[in-house]
Amino acid sequence: MFSISQELASCPDLDVALVKILGILDQNLGLHRSSILLLKGESDELSTEIAHGLSEEEKERGRFKKGEGITGMVLESGEPVIVPDISLEPRFLNRTGSRLSKKEKTAFIAVPLIFQGRKLGVLSADRSASGGKESLEEDVRLLTTISSIMAQAVLLRHNFDDEKRRLQDETSRLEHALKHRYTISGWIGRSKLVAQIAESVHQVAASRATVLILGESGTGKEVIAKAIHFNSPRNKMPFIQINCAAIPETLLESELFGHEKGAFTGASLSRPGRFEAANEGTIFLDEIGEIPPSVQVKLLRVLQERVVERIGSNRPIPIDVRIVAATNRNLDQEVRMNRFREDLYYRLNVIPIYLPPLRHRKEDIPLLLEHFRSRFIEENGRDVRIASDAIDVFMEYDWPGNVRELENIVERLVVMARKDIITADDVVQTLALFPVHSSGVPSVESSGNISTPTTTGREPAAPSRGASVHEINTDLPDTIREIERERIIKALERSGGVKTRAALALGITTRQLVYRMEKYGIRGEGI
């Protein structure tokens, strides 16, 4: 029993463990030609899955329906059966044909495999009948105990196989859905620029080349990265994404390359990095322009030699990873200002793909509007349409936040709509409420024409009780600047002056925060 329990506990492959257990029954207990017969799915037929002392052909013949022969009877009744002499038992079918010799009197024992009331199969074995009835009854007690251990292991394997099949089906379904979602042909837009990007993505996806995606925030760099992966030969392998700007400098190296146990304080376990996790797949390094010089050196070696070294180890680990990077920075300028390594830049910039801002492809805005409107009315159970004058406002605005900003605005309009139609006034008021809009928000004049208010530099006056929406809108840009300045100061105070934390709290990048601090004259030491 100890040997049997040890095999089940130590062997990761259940079939291998069960074969060894049947060998133990043969060698230690004299139980020969032992077999494990299992039910397949919802059928009522037993088939010999594992056997000791039987050929593959004999195993294939060992099939019994419920109630058929001694084995089928044990399954049906759920009770063990002893046949003292198989030559005298007409119900013993010898289906396998393995018992040809009649020189020695042979007994047959069969016990059910049952766990938690569920019948899973039958465990059977032959033994010499010379030991007498008491010896056979002792064998039944022992085999019943062993069968209960086996039944638990078999049920766990069934559950594992079912879960594995379910996960494989779910993975296939998600892969199909993602592949459909990120196919470039399904992009919303029909401008010439979108067609050029689609052609570039299809051309580069089949290769192994490193891709650098350039463009402003919100232009869809992540969508392009996923499209490259899901249209490539690596589409069934991992797609690992990491935002280099969202991870503190002290942790970024460990996240990318991994670390060994004891490499630094708190490293209680060895941990692989994202490059190892992406092996044979694609790694997407978003905001690549934000990585510090110390990490740039290591990243350059990964690109050159295709190996990584964990922190605290000198052992190189080979990797096969497709690298896609993205940034909204001007890396040419960063190189000239010695903030980004020139050799790393050229390693990354093998295939550049530039994503134009939305203001350069405004002909796509109506299609994007309809796409987002349809999606959000379905998600929120609303029935809202967009008026033609509202579409004019969308077309007039320059969209500094690009497609992401457009998506957010449409969602807010759909959710907050009080009527079944979104008007130009609704769009203007919603645009003005967003903190990123320091200027350039269109207004609707009494004539219905769209104009962009200019800033006056004066402090905004409180609107009079009878002021119209259009009159209030002319003061909104100044008001919004004050609100944004106060939010930045409070975020810096809460973060102790740490710009990275403040930027995360505000939902912007560190570079955008520094730009706004300079714009509003906010000094870090004054916080």
Image (tube, grey):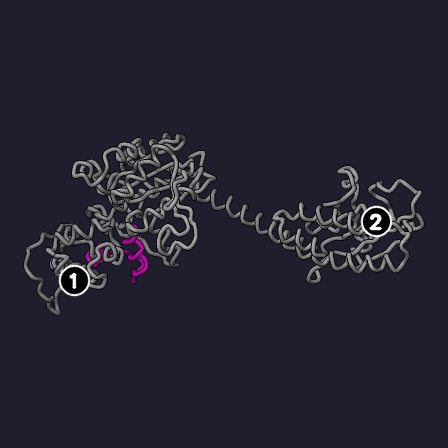
For the residue pair 470 and 460, the one nearer the viewer reads as 460
**Which residue is painted at 35% across and 34% down in the image?**
201
Q: Quadrant of the N terminus?
A: bottom right
Q: Is residue 211 above or below residue 422?
A: above
Tag 1–tag 2 contact (CB < 8 Å): no
Q: Crowdedness of circle 2 by 10 Å Cα count: few (<14), some, many (20+)?
A: many
* Element at label 1: helix
Q: Crowdedness of circle 1 by 10 Å Cα count: few (<14), some, many (20+)?
A: few
Q: Amino acid at mark 2?
A: Asp
Give percent across and percent down for residue 455: 9, 54
Q: Is residue 95 at least partly visible in the picture?
A: yes
Q: Which mark is residue 486?
A: 1
Give percent across and percent down for residue 478: 11, 58
Range covered by the magenta-colored residues: 407-433
Q: Is residue 196 left or right of residue 146?
A: left
Q: CA distance from mark 1 to mark 2?
A: 86 Å
**What secondary structure is the magenta-colored segment mainly?**
helix
